[in-house]
Amino acid sequence: MRLSLTVNGERREVDGVWEGESLLTALREHLDLPGSKNACEQGECGSCSVYLDGELVCACLVLAGQAEGREVITVEGLAGEGELHEVQRAFVETGAVQCGFCTPGLVVATAALLRDNPAPSEDEMREALAGNLCRCTGYEKILDAVRLAAENTSAQSTAERAAS
Ligand code: FES
Ligand code: FES
């Protein structure tokens, strides 16, 4: 089938998508966006997290056909031209990336958390990332990254408010 959707702000159309194919497979294999990872394909690990019409979803649990005409943002679409997203920078600065397989999903989930709740409590951070599994880091560095991203995001909004 033909799939038409908007991905990372760009209208895309691809042919040859199988009716039973997941959005994750379509992104990785038809749309040349391998950032979202396939670790479990069962909605258990969060490594395939993307926004679908602004909502955080596991792309492995969404049929590609369900994304027809809709808007998807992947980890590749979070950052601006030539620069890292605040959350990506925080993951790098705190050493929260080891093998990196879980990182794209964690970055998207953290960005979604901070978009909706710029100053999350410890419990809210842990709850928001409860669906994202990491086999390497023990999660402490990841939580450090979320705290740093939250601090930087709120400092940035304060500076923007002061300048306006
Ligand atoms: S690959 Fe989608 S949740 Fe694990
Ligand atoms: S850094 Fe390896 S799975 Fe998280």
Image (tube, rainbow, N blue to C red):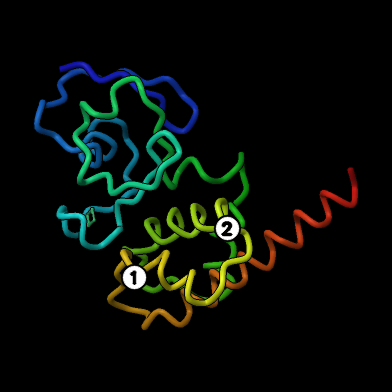
Which is nearer the N-term, disc 1 or disc 2?
Answer: 1
Looking at the image, which residue is at 54% across and 77% down? 144
Q: In this rendered view, identify the residue nearer to me: 19 or 125.
A: 125
When asked about the image quadrant of residue 145, the answer is bottom right
Q: In this rendered view, identify the residue nearer to me: 106 or 123.
A: 123
Is residue 128 shown left or right of residue 1? right
Q: Quadrant of the C terminus?
A: top right
Q: Which residue is mark 2?
A: 117
Give the number of marks: 2
Q: Position of residue 28 (x, y in %)?
A: 26, 40
Identify the element where label 2 is drawn: loop
Identify the element where label 1 is drawn: loop
Q: Position of residue 134 (x, y in %)?
A: 31, 72
Task: Bin the neighbour count of mark 2 within 10 Å (Cα to Cα): few under 14, some 14-19, many 20 and up.
Answer: few
Looking at the image, which residue is at 39% across and 66% down? 129
Q: In this rendered view, identify the residue nearer to me: 145 or 127.
A: 127
- Mark 1 vs ligand 2: CB under 8 Å? yes
Please, what is the three-letter code of the amino acid marked with disc 2?
Asn
